[in-house]
Image: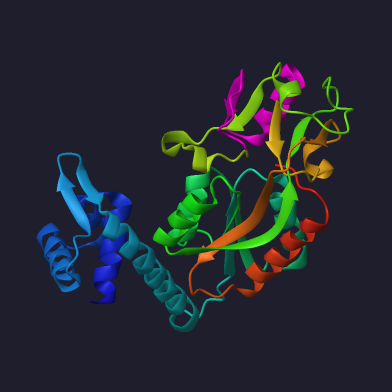
Amino acid sequence: MTLTQLIYVVKIAETKSMNKAAAELFVSQPALSSAIRELEEELHTELFSRSNRGILITTEGEEFLSYARQMVELNTLIDQRFIDQKEVKKKFSVSMQHYSFAVEAFIELGKRFSMNEFELAVHETKTHEVIENVRDHRSELGVLYVNDFNERAMKKIFSENGLSFHPLFICGISVYLSKNHPLANREKISFEELSDYPCLSFEQGEKNSFYFAEEVLSTLDYKQTIKADDRATMLNLMVGMNGYTLCSGIICKELNGENYVSVPLDTDDTMTIGYIKRKHMPLSKIGQEYINILAGYGETQVDF
């Protein structure tokens, strides 16, 4: 196995075409196919499958690609730093479910590190994309939750993707709604009291499942439900339609504004906020600092 073969694998996965990859790599298509075939024989693994729709990466290929991409990126960094003599910025990326507290923590992180030295990236996205981003080295960390319902399934998914889950804090479940909502002034809200109002949840796309739901108690029977793709739309629906969502409880007023409140749900259920990372991969200095900031939110109660 050679670095050249790893570069070939990454390029084919990006273009999903042998012809396009060969053109961008400035090699002949037969030479590229031969190099991949030799690599697959060496690994005793099929990395790509060929079909009428083009090149598809196999499940084993996805796993191999995550390592290949890391090696190719590392080689590029070495070339830039020691051969081209370029000062390369250190990179940090985090993916997360739609948690404003995690975005707020990212903002605080940016204040603590010089942007001249670091290139930072944040991805607030669907649950399966959080997992895939960390698995495929697009993000160092992923922030999400587990609870009694999804923990077993989620940890199995993490393990299958070479990831480990690390809890940060446990919190109760709250109802997040507009401060003008008829139930906004209650000390606690029961599930029955919510039945006349639409329950809001984040759309999870093609890989939707109860286990991937960003909202706890997703299997309960709701009379009215509305799905949204982003947090801004969710907040607008809370104001315009008296909608609500179930969350963990921290109000980030600087980001979401003063027009929303969090009221405890009358339940004993809890959720565990934590992060995922690649197994056996130590956290970077900036990654550890981000985790330290996140852990501080355990002293309060968290919102979505």
Left or right of 303 in this view: 26: left
Residue at 13% in and 65% down: 37
Residue 68: x, y in percent?
34, 68
Residue at 46% in and 62% down: 137
Q: Is residue 79 magenta-colored?
A: no
Visible in this render: residue 33?
yes
**Quadrant showing the N terminus:** bottom left
**Viewer-proximal residue, 13 or 142?**
142
Residue 29: x, y in percent?
14, 57
**Viewer-proximal residue, 53 or 278?**
278
Residue 179: x, y in percent?
85, 27
Q: Which residues are magenta?
A: 217-243
Q: Residue furthest bottom?
A: 82
Left or right of 44 in this view: 57: right
Residue 117: x, y in percent?
65, 71
Left or right of 161 in this view: 125: right
| Residue 251 falls in image quadrant | top right
Q: Is residue 238 magenta-colored?
A: yes
**Quadrant showing the C terminus:** top right
Residue at 42% in and 78% down: 79
